[in-house]
Image (cartoon, rainbow, N blue to C red):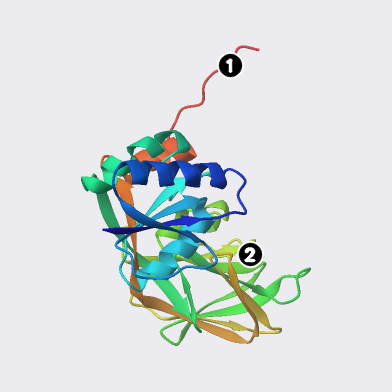
Amino acid sequence: MKIAIVSNKKILQTTDITEKIENELKNSGLDYDTLDVNNLKSGYDFVCSAGGDGTILKTSRYYAKTATPVMGINSGRLGFLSLITPEEVYMLGDIIKNSKYEIQERIMLKTKGCTALNDFVIKGHSPNRSAKFNLYINDRLVSDYIADGLIISTPTGSTAYGLSAGGPILVPGLKSFVIVPICAHTMTARPLVVPDSEKITVKSVDEYLDVSCDGQETIVKVKEIGIELSEYRAKLAFPVGDNFYSILRNKLNWGVSPVSQNV
């Protein structure tokens, strides 16, 4: 079994965590290479991604093309996709050698050479003003927006920017997308959940659009953008026992009652 350790050197804690992962895999008799997140290569059976969610997003998109499982070790902030903490790295060898993990396939979006595991964020090219958008689904006009932008999200990305903008949380296994307007200038503009078989098109009414892919790649100055289901699936590996609902509770304090404080 050949393993890649993908490291993001821009995160300060990652160097120490990467060394811990290397020592753990070496002591477990596992064969590995250490790669920089900006210099990935294929040819591996399993990938450990050391960094935050941005690191695992980039790593998962790359290895989706070879259907290689990716497990995240969190050295960032929230780490919604990277569940193993630095203190739990000592368990990594046992988890990998004895297959104590579950692989979840996650759908992705694609457009114009870009693929997104989380979302595409569409905004007007002029940063200081709202833009006018027309939303089409399967070439039929659905809605007009005057808004700061639109978020087209997968279920995986529904807990990211879309949630902050007022969108719903989708269970990762759902075959659907969610369209969330950002600060729309009308009370009737609400998030819309659609099947992942739909083709989504966003057209600008009055200016060029910029499109951000997972917050990492950008398409600039287009008049319209077509978004649809990618033929690839990201394969995320999680330790056995972790599930989406416990992650919501532990990472986002979802459904946790406020603790009363004596002042």
Instruction: Find disc 2 in the rendering and name its residue.
Output: 184
Q: Residue at x 42, y 47 (%)?
A: 22
Q: Residue furthest left?
A: 98
Write down the residue under mark 1.
261
Q: Characterize the local packing of mark 2: few (<14), some (14-19) or many (20 or more) Cα atoms within 10 angstroms.
A: some
Label 1: which secondary element: loop
In the image, 188: left or right of 239?
right
- Location of residue 165 in the rendering, given as x and y in whole percent from the top left corner: 57, 56
Please identify the quadrant where the N terminus is shown: bottom left
- Using the image as rendered, state which of residue 240 and residue 13 is in the foreground: 13
Q: Amino acid at mark 2?
A: Ala
Expressed as whole percent of the image width and height from the top left, the position of residue 227 reads 46, 79
Please state which of the two labelled residues, at mark 1 or mark 2, is closer to the viewer.
1
Asked which secondary structure carries label 2, the reply is loop
Residue 168, x across and y down, in percent: 45, 54
Q: Is residue 193 visible?
A: no
**Viewport quadrant of the C terminus:** top right
Residue 27: percent from left, percent from top: 33, 41
Farthest-out residue, top: 262
Residue 2 numbered mark, or none: none
Query: Quick check: can you spot residue 142?
Result: yes
